Structure formats: C-alpha cells, structure tokens
Image: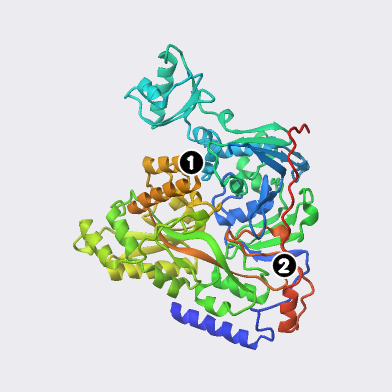
Amino acid sequence: MMALRVLLILVLLVASGCNDSTSSFFGTTAPRHDDTILWTNNGSEPEWIDPGKCGESAGSTLVYNLFSGLLQPHPKTLEPMPDIATHWKKSEDGRTYTFYLRESTWSDGHPFTAHDLEWSWKRVLDPKTDSRYASFLWTLKNGEAFNRGATAISNLPPGTTIEELTNHLGPAIAVEKIELDIEDRQAFLFLKSQDDQKKAMELMKDKPFKDILLEVTPATRDHVGVKALNNLTLEVNLQNPIPYFLSVIMFYTTMPVPRHAIERLEKEGKNPELWTRPEYIVSNGAYNFKEWKFRQYMLLEKNERYWDSKNTRTRHIRLEMTDSYNTSLNIYKTGQFDWIGENMNLPSEFLQLLSKYSDYSRSPYLAVYFYWINTKAPPMDNPKIRQAMSLAIDRVALVNHITRGNQQPYGSLIPDGLAGYKGLDLPLFDPKRAKELIKEAGYNDPSEIPPITLKYNTSEGHKQIAEAIQQMWKKHLGITVEIANQEWKVFLKDIQAYDFQIGRMGWIGDYPDPYTFMELLVGANGNNHSNWKSPTYDNMLKEANSLNAPQARLDLLREAEAMAMKDTPVIPLYVYTRSDMWKPYVKGLWPNFQNRHPFKYIWIDTRFKPGLSDEELERLAALDNEPPPMPELPQPQPEENP
C-alpha cells in the first residue's frame, strides 16, 4: 500500500513537472503575495521558545529570530559578527572576555543592559530552571558547580591540595570530584547525594582544616563567572580557555530573556512561564510575535525597536505547522510555501527527481542521525546486545536505498574532519560479528531475547528508516523489534523520562568543534538520554578542554569517544546532508553547515512574474543575492563608562 501511494504521488509529480511551462523549477515561480511577507513551514509546534528551556529545532528557529545575543553568525560563513555587542577583547590566557554593548531596547521600550545577559545566563544554570542545555554554560567559571548544587569552600590556606581535602572529609562522605581554585583560594565539592552534602557542610563547619574553620556554603549564582561591570559592559570568565567560545555565545541558549517581563507576571500572580505567549512576550531580536494559532501557524512581525531594524528586509513571516514531508512539498509546489523551511525535510523517495530542478539545493550539514539506547532498560542493558544491533545495520544500503540524499554512512558519533578531528572509522556493517555477540550475550536462540520497541517521532522519513532497520535486525539477527511512532511533544517527554528502549534522534552541531557531540554523553548533561554515565569519560573531556595544545586535545577527545562507543550508548547511522528548496524569487538564503537562516536577511523579489522563460528566471535568480560583508570590528577601548 505504501509503495502504491508513493508511485501515484511520483506519477503526479512527474506529470505536473512535464506539463509546467517553467519546468526547470518545481511548481510556481512567481510570488502569490506581496513583498511584505514570507510564507514558510516550521514543521511542528515548538516545545519551548524560552531560550533557557528550548532544546529542539522547532523552538530554536523562533528563538533565533525573536532574540539577539552578544554575537550573531554570518549568514553564509557562520563567522562571528557583532550583534548586541559592538566589539570585544580576550585576555592573553584566553580565560576572560570583555564585551562592549551597544545601546538598545527590548520590544516594549525597556532599556536592554548587560545585567539582562548576566541574569539570563545564571537563570539557565539555576537548577530551578531545569534547562536541558544548562551544561552548555558549564564553560563559565563555576557554572557546573552552581548548576549541580556543589558545596563551596572558601578561605582555603595557601597550598591546599585535593588529596588533603579528601582526607579531611573522610571515607563516610561520598565525593564525586573536587575542583580546586588556587587563585581564589576556594574549592567546590561535588558530592553524590544531598545527604553527603549535609554531612560535609556540618563537618567543615565544626572540624578545623589546618587549624582554620573554613567558610562552607552551597554554590550560588554569585560564584558564576559572568558579571555586568556596568550597563554596557559584560565580563565573562571561563573555566578553561576553550577554542570555540565565540560560537557558544551564538547559540540560542545564551540569548537573553526579559527579566522585567517575567518578574512582572510573578508580581501579578500569574505563571511566569507564560511570558512567551503572544500577549506577554517581550523580545529584543529582529521579530516579535503578532499571532499564534496552535498547530496551525505563527505570524511574526518586524520588531521596529530592534537595533538593526533598518536592515530587516521582510515585515512579516508566516510559519505553518505542517509535519508531513509530502504535504509540505505539495504546498511548496503550489506556491503557498515560498521556502520548505529549515526544520522540514524533503521526501527521500523524491530526492532524485527533485534534484533536477533549479530551486533544489543540497549542502553539507553538521549533524548526525542516531538511535539513543536506554542502557538501563532490559535487554538493552547488555552491551553485547547493543553492539550486535549496531553491527547488524547495513548503513550503506540504508543511505543508498532509503534516505537517498547522499548522506555519509557512519558508525561513530563525531564526524571525521571536524575542526581537525580524526574519526574512529568504526565498522558500518558486520552481520557475522553481530551474530557472535548475540551468543556471547547468552542467547543461542534470538527468539528468547525479551521484547524490544523502537520509538520515533512522526514523519515519513523516520518511519522508512525504522522499518528498514527493523527488517535488518530480523534478517541478520533473528530479532523481532516493534516500532512505534509518536507526536513530537509526546515523543520528547518519553525520551526525557527514559520511557523507551531505543529512540530516534538527530543532533545538529551547536558549534564547529568535536565537543558539541561529545558532551551529549556527559553523565550530568540534560541532553544525555542514554542512561549511560562514566566518570572516566567525563574527566577525559574535562582534561581535554584544559589543554592548550590543540592536537593533544583532539587526541584525548578521540580516546574518550573510543571508550564510549565500545559501550554503545548510541547507534549512529549517518552524517546528514541538507536538501532544501526555495522559490527563485526568495533572496537572502545561503546554504551553510548548520542550516541557520536568519529571517531578517530574507526578502521577496517582485520582479518575478508569471510566464517568464527559464532563461529569464535563471538570470533573475542570480541577481542581488550576495551575502552581507563581514564588518570591520573597531578596536576595543581600555575603559568604557556609559
């Protein structure tokens, strides 16, 4: 039935393409509206559009266009450019950044200050916020300590060592790790339970350390290394001099939120989480909300108070909530979508046909498609079962016959070549070894393996991949796996609650460094849904990020990945490519490896009229579509007193 449906749609698409007078483009080639609006698709309803709580692509599109952070990526190269910050300076040791802000306001006219950024970043780290991306700001000095509720010890005697502190605590207190800050004469105790924390605080207050009673408190937001020096100057102190920090602060988690609007709702006795609703939202980015029809569409409107509003090209953006690839493609064909949208994929069964059209684009994409394994859920708690199921997947066949978008079949988590990283080159398919592992796991008869279910969020593409892999597991291992699709928000809740055995996921690199993928498996990371934790792995990553030697850092990261993949908490399948379509009259879209396309650059070229020849369409499509130049940064001043 599925094959018949695909065949019928394909026949209709081919027939309509052959009968189209402008057949080098797919469907309409003139806008069905004026140049004040862009019609596109968001794919699904966002779970959150609060920058501090957002954790998925549908929400990130809204966050990036409603809010502005310190820096913004160039729309083609993704190089850091000024946004709220006009310029910045970095200390010689790479641990301290100072950002100088421009005068700007929130969309309600309230002044925007460096204090807003300080409060927003500390809000992300506050355990009460329950941000899945809190670990993203562990890059800040003592960010992890505050986020994880560590115990702070102050006024340490000079020369104190971690071994001395461990001995002072004694064997009765279970210590996960101790971080020592010699310069500030303080330490942070990461303890394994709240009971251990209580015991440690009582002991430290009553038992002198080197004849000194130490100051002991829970880690607070005041310990975190971000501080507004004045209204327009922000100082940031890092835990380690990481090479990718400027990319970190272009990610949506670091976008500011309006403290004054959130606290106003609290004072009025309303739920402060409602602040992102259209009637309450206050933003500082290129757009603001005008209308939101649940599960239908969102309408964004140009924010006239945005500092660079004069360069925002299109007044309104209409985002539909259509999660079907086929439906979205047909809507695009009729011209009701000007652009497929950055969260929507093209149907894999039509990619070969669509690639012949001039409005089709394919580009590299810093993203990996994989399956989470709940390593605590039987029988997936057996690493040999996990390894066998990974090796029984024919990844080459999967991308050649199912996904069909020139994806790179891949058996490990970190893409080869990323910032100089050498990938692990793990086997893509080894059914013989997979069968041996099933026996080593204690199952001579695969039918005796307890039931297994693979969950995925609703989409034709995910379903086709799941069905193909289901058949591979049956063919090569004799294992019957059930598959279950769920609506996006329901699926996310199950994944976050570990209510699954195997779960589909894709991860888009948040910045161009291997750590963006490796931190997924850090034990305390809110995005680690594998139930797999390894203090050794965590410490290796921490040590790697403390190294100033780039190659030594990459070598240690590679060693850590090899250790993790041996345990198989995830089953990687392939590295993405990005297939996209936008009408020839849509300008201001440039492919990039993170698929980030700020709406403020996009505009509608009204020179496109019905009936134009292919040659004229191609000529117009190439006109006036150069990306903006990289700005020259002014030299930072030693003192600024706004």
Quadrant into which the C terminus falls: top right
Residue 508 in view: no
| Percent of width and height locating residue 117 | 66, 39
| Percent of width and height locating residue 458 | 48, 64
Foreground mark, 1 or 2, reads 1
Above or below 240: residue 515: below
- Residue at 32%, 24% in the rendered image: 172
Q: Quadrant of residue 453?
A: bottom left
**What residue type is disc 1 on?**
Leu
Left or right: residue 380 versus residue 549 is left
In the image, which disc is placed on residue 107?
Answer: none
Q: Quadrant of residue 587?
A: bottom right
Left or right: residue 529 versus residue 567 is right
Above or below 600: residue 5: below
Mark 1–mark 2 distance (CA, rounded to whole Å): 43 Å
List the residue tagged with mark 2.
Answer: 587
SS of the residue at dot 2? strand
| Percent of width and height locating residue 352 | 53, 78
Above or below 625: residue 529: above
List the residue tagged with mark 1.
Answer: 547
Which residue in the rendered view is the most extreme toward the left?
A: 444
- Residue at 71%, 61% in the rendered image: 317
Q: Earlier in the sequence, mark 1 or mark 2?
A: 1
| Percent of width and height locating residue 633 | 73, 47
